[in-house]
Amino acid sequence: MKFGSVDDPGNLDLSLPQDHPDTYKVLESNKQGQLEGIYVGCAKWNKKDLKGFYPRGTKDELEYYAKQFNSIELNATHYKIYGEDVISGWREKSGDNFKFFPKVVNSISHFKRLKGVEALVEEYTLPIRAFEEKLGMIFLQLRDDFKPKDFDRVERFLEIWPKDLPLAIELRHTDWYNDDTVATRTYQLFEEHNVSNIITDTAGRRDLLHMRLTTPDAFIRYVGANHQTDYSRLDEWVDRLKIWKNHGLRNLYFFVHQNVEKESPLLSAYFIEKLNKALGTDLDLPNKDPEPPKLDL
């Protein structure tokens, strides 16, 4: 994943900013006040990207991946609409507690840019339902040049989106966050429709670290730089998530990317181990490796 990459992340201040004050109001709206689920995973499961992750002789990549992680940020659904038979096959290969987090197809987000997509939304979501109980949260990523002037398209999209399918949205143009009026209006819209506001942590786009949750479910896309600072950045996230848990975090969806994706499982293992210690959870470590993984620098 090259989005937000930089030549030398060691020269940047990559610390997490303070939380938006309204984030705590949203977290405390979780009446149960309990952490229901933590899902940590990568964005892909194929051998080509995750080189060295699969033991020699692995016959089915998804089946093995789903034994190591409890979730996948499914970018494959961004490039085509898969049939129910394919999605049912994926569902059956994964474990009982595994969740899929599919990305909205690009014909909706990038080509149509949310305009006149009623039929496409129905075409996309019908087979997605075949994930059944293993569907986590669908996420919509809009282009970098999708600007607030098209706010009405977002409004219309949320009106037609099936209310029983959980949704998160990633807005990438900086004006969604730098203009306070636009940002407030957007956050309110997301809250009204129970849409999670994705937080993207990448070295070259710190403006996307808005730290504003719109539901008690945190959807975080973490992009490492294949650099030692990746670990200290994750340490900060563990500390922040502990605070959010104490304020009422309901679910955590945390997906690890790397500029060179083969390092993603190693970084994920490090994060899971730290998270277990800080939050008292017992997520399985990928490959059950007892030693903290090291980047191959």
Image (cartoon, rainbow, N blue to C red):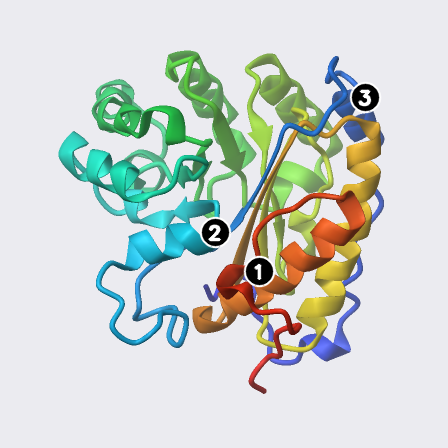
**Left or right of 68: which side holds 250?**
right
Of marks 3 and 2, the one in the foreground = 2
Q: Judge whether 247 appears above or below 57 on screen.
A: above
Taking the image as drawn, is residue 286 in sight?
A: yes
Q: Mark 1 points at which residue?
A: 268
Considering depth in this image, is 253 or 223 the residue closer to the camera? 253
Identify residue type, mark 1.
Ser
Considering depth in this image, is 167 or 173 the residue closer to the camera? 167
Residue in view at x 71 percent, y 73 percent: 229
Cα distance between the residues tagged 1 and 2: 9 Å
Q: Name the residue under label 2.
A: 69
Q: In what quadrant of the picture does the C terminus appear?
A: bottom right
Res 141 quadrant in image = top left
On the image, the x and y values in percent for residue 59 come to 22, 63
Cα distance between the residues tagged 1 and 3: 29 Å
On the image, the x and y values in percent for residue 242 come to 80, 42
Label 3 secondary element: helix
Residue in view at x 43 percent, y 24 percent: 153
Residue in view at x 85 percent, y 45 percent: 18
Which numbered disc covers residue 25?
A: 3
**N-terminal label among 1 and 3:** 3
Packing grade of label 1 (10 A; few <14, some 14-19, many >=20) is many
Identify residue type, mark 2.
Phe
Q: In what quadrant of the picture does the N terminus appear?
A: bottom left
On the image, the x and y values in percent for residue 98 come to 43, 39
Residue in view at x 76 percent, y 67 percent: 232
**N-terminal label among 3 and 2:** 3
Q: Judge whether 241 appears above or below 130 on screen.
A: below
Res 44 quadrant in image = bottom left
Label 1 secondary element: helix
